Amino acid sequence: MAEERTRFAVARPLRLMFQDEARFGRISDVRHCWQKKPHRPVVKAMVTQQYVYAYGAISPADGRFDSLILPQVNGKCMQLFLDEVARRYPDENIVMVLDGAGWHKSPFQLADNLRLIFLPPYAPELNPQEHVWDELREKYFHNRAFDSLEALEAHLEQGLAQLENQPGKMQSLTGWEWIINSIYK
């Protein structure tokens, strides 16, 4: 991280963030559940081909989580997300860690307070943002069927807002020792 500090023209506090995208669609995630005998639980399930994408970035040091819901995963949408994150932290320099998705290699116009670094290939277990998606799917989307893409998007927006408002919980999910040590050394 010391090396990354030198890449910024203006010295400001440094924020380390991990970024990823997740697809949410009108396809149910059916899970097992318990019910007293003789009842059998009934869960609606559907398969459709309608999706929206959540872009998210987590700051493990303090649990700050930023997200946007966008219609696609591509360089244009990624640029919108990067601009929004840079705008939310104008008084900090941001080092954002990304995986090697093709749209992450687009020629971005980065804000002065934002730099990108990449995870090694095929290493999603190094990205704590993956745990945020797991939490969102487990707590907000299991055994749910939506009548429309708009209903799904409204539910996704509520779930993301709740996670954004729980920095302590986000920090406990993502504040891995090796990440925290890299920030403070």
Image (cartoon, helix red, strand yellow):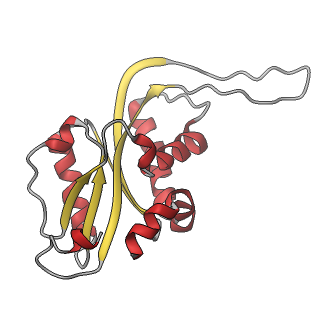
Residue 178 shows in this picture: yes
Instruction: Give how far across and how far down residue 176 sits, in percent.
Output: 51, 60
Instruction: Give how far across and how far down residue 146 sits, in percent.
Output: 50, 30
Along the line of sight, the residue nearer the viewer: 94 or 41: 94
Classify residue 158 as left or right of residue 13. right
Question: On screen, 89 above or below 51?
Answer: below
Along the line of sight, the residue nearer the viewer: 132 or 70: 132
Taking the spot 81% from the left edge, 20% from the top edge, the residue there is: 40
Question: On screen, 130 above or below 6?
Answer: above
Taking the spot 19% from the left edge, 39% from the top edge, the residue there is: 103
**Residue 140 in which image quadrant:** top right
Question: On screen, 158 above or below 74?
Answer: below
- Report the residue that reaches farthest toward the top: 47
Classify residue 161 as left or right of residue 72. right
Residue 55 shows in this picture: no
Instruction: Give how far across and how far down residue 99 sits, in percent.
Output: 30, 44
